[in-house]
Image: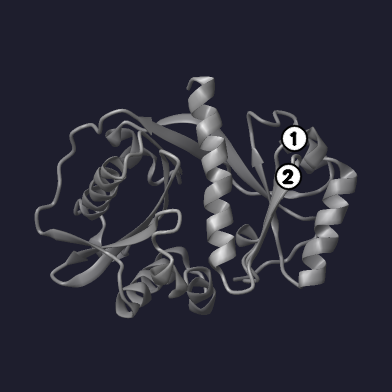
Amino acid sequence: MNPESRTRIDKHVIAAYATHYRTIAGGVFELTHDWARGFSGVKIPTFNVFLPLSEGGLKDETLADTAAFFASKNVVYAIELIHDRFPHGPTYLNERYYQSLPPQPAMALMGALKEVTLNSTVTIERVKNVPQIAAFCTILNEVFDFDLSNVIKLFPVAYLAKSNIGYFHHYLAFVNDEPAAAGTIICKDGVASIWNLSTLDKYRRMGVATTLLHKMLSQVAQDGSDLTMLYSTPQAYHLFTRFGFEIYTQRQWFLPPGLYYED
């Protein structure tokens, strides 16, 4: 990836986080030269995140301040590390007894979509009302095994009223009029990111996620974005490569020492 595209993606990631956390009731997003910090208030560590941006953001003093901040909020949290920005970061955190979660490929798509096979029986709708946002949250609850109250707090009805701010849009895929899959697009400054792509178990291997992602990426192009990024799971990696996404780095979450977390 060329440096200009990478700079655009890095800027977009911060803007997307800011939009997300500041839409949550009671949510906070702080940004300095050295780090970014997002507080959602939910009891899921990866939704209360500290993101180092420079060497000054990955120091013992900064980590101690971060631990104190989240302790004062009475929530668990995670350090989000971008591997190529901090090649020494995993070792640094492991030596301080942070618990590493599996790394996730960061992938980007530039240019036209590759041709894929779609399921013509699947219908796609943008989430525009309360029943649809409820269906969206229910799918995320079932697929990711999050507590439903946490999901509702993370993706509130307020998104519907503010959906034109930062182009933060949710989508549902339907099979026989039943919600089967969900996903989110964030478009800002010519860059888009895909979040929450998820399919209920009984609709897997039917082309539902492929059809939904194709619709979302087509919408991204219509909105004027020429660069799209996402974080992949191992299960979804081959789906994204079929569309032309390529890895440009990895991110990894680290939980603080001694954390016992149970969703």
x then y, percent, for residue 208: 22, 55
> Label 2 is placed on what type of residue?
Trp
Q: Residue furthest top?
A: 2
Looking at the picture, tell me which residue is in the foreground, 54 or 140.
Answer: 54
Q: How is the image coloured?
A: one colour
x then y, percent, for residue 9: 51, 36
Relative vertical location of residue 167 with respect to residue 230 in this rendering, above or below: below
x then y, percent, for residue 108: 42, 33
- The quarter of the image holding the C terminus is bottom right
Q: Name the residue tied to disc 1.
A: 54
Q: Residues within 10 Å of mark 2 (few under 14, many from 20)?
A: some
- Quick one: label 2 or label 1, which is nearer the N terminus? 2
- Please say if the residues under marks 2 and 1 sit with CB atoms less than 8 Å apart: yes
Looking at the picture, tell me which residue is in the foreground, 157 or 75.
Answer: 157
Q: Name the residue tied to disc 2.
A: 35
Q: Is residue 104 visible?
A: no
| Mark-to-mark CA distance, 2 and 1 | 7 Å
Looking at the rendered structure, the secondary structure element under dot 1 is loop
Q: Residue furthest right?
A: 61
Residue at 32% from the left image edge and 40% from the top image edge:
224
Q: Is residue 36 visible?
A: yes
Count of labels shown? 2
